[in-house]
């Protein structure tokens, strides 16, 4: 077996078992959005991307990041006069 970007893959079979995390750390969320830590903290502190704490760790749900991306794409499409997808 080999690990590839959080996915556990068995090379002798076509089946791929995905082990995706539902909650990401700040660093992981920055990588996921391709943005900087200060930008992500500004978005979280401003309420655009919800986050929560477990102990001292601040986490973000992947679904909230996906929703933020969809909203940004829709806003960009609307600004260019394109209908919502």
Image (cartoon, rainbow, N blue to C red):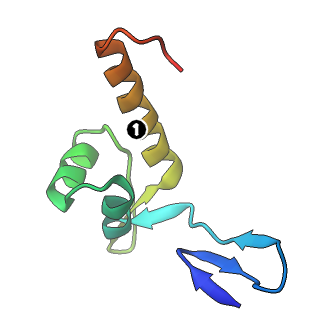
Q: Total number of numbered labels?
A: 1
| Secondary structure of residue under mark 1 | helix
Which of the pair 83/49 is nearer the observer?
Answer: 83
**12 with respect to 27 (left or right):** right
Q: Quadrant of the C terminus?
A: top right
Q: x%, y% of residue 6?
A: 56, 75
- Is 10 above or below relative to 45? below
Q: x%, y% of residue 53?
A: 38, 63
The residue carrying pointer 1 sits among few (fewer than 14), some (14 to 19) or many (20 or more) residues within 10 Å by Cα, namely: some
Q: Residue at x 31, y 37 (%)?
A: 48
Residue at the extreme bottom of the image, as rendered: 1
Which of the pair 25/32 is nearer the observer?
Answer: 32
Q: x%, y% of residue 16?
A: 76, 71
Quarter holding residue 26 = bottom left
Q: x%, y% of residue 78?
A: 36, 14
- Is 29 above or below relative to 79? below
Q: Which residue is mark 1?
A: 68
Which of the pair 20/84 is nearer the observer?
Answer: 84
**23 with respect to 44 (left or right):** right
- Is 69 above or below relative to 10? above
Q: Residue at x 29, y 39 (%)?
A: 47
Q: Quadrant of the N terminus?
A: bottom right
Q: Residue at x 20, y 61 (%)?
A: 37
- Is 80 above or below relative to 67? above
Which of the pair 10/25 is nearer the observer?
Answer: 10
**23 with respect to 80 (left or right):** right
Q: Residue at x 31, y 69 (%)?
A: 27
């Amino acid at each position: 077996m080999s690990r590839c970007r959080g996915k556990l893959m068995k090379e002798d079979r076509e089946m791929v078992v995905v082990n995706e995390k539902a909650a990401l750390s700040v660093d992981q969320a920055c990588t996921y959005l391709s943005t900087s830590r200060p930008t992500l903290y500004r978005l979280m502190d401003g309420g655009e991307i919800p986050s929560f704490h477990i102990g001292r760790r601040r986490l973000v749900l992947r679904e909230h990041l996906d929703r933020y991306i969809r909203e940004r794409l829709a806003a960009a499409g609307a600004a260019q006069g394109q209908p919502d997808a």
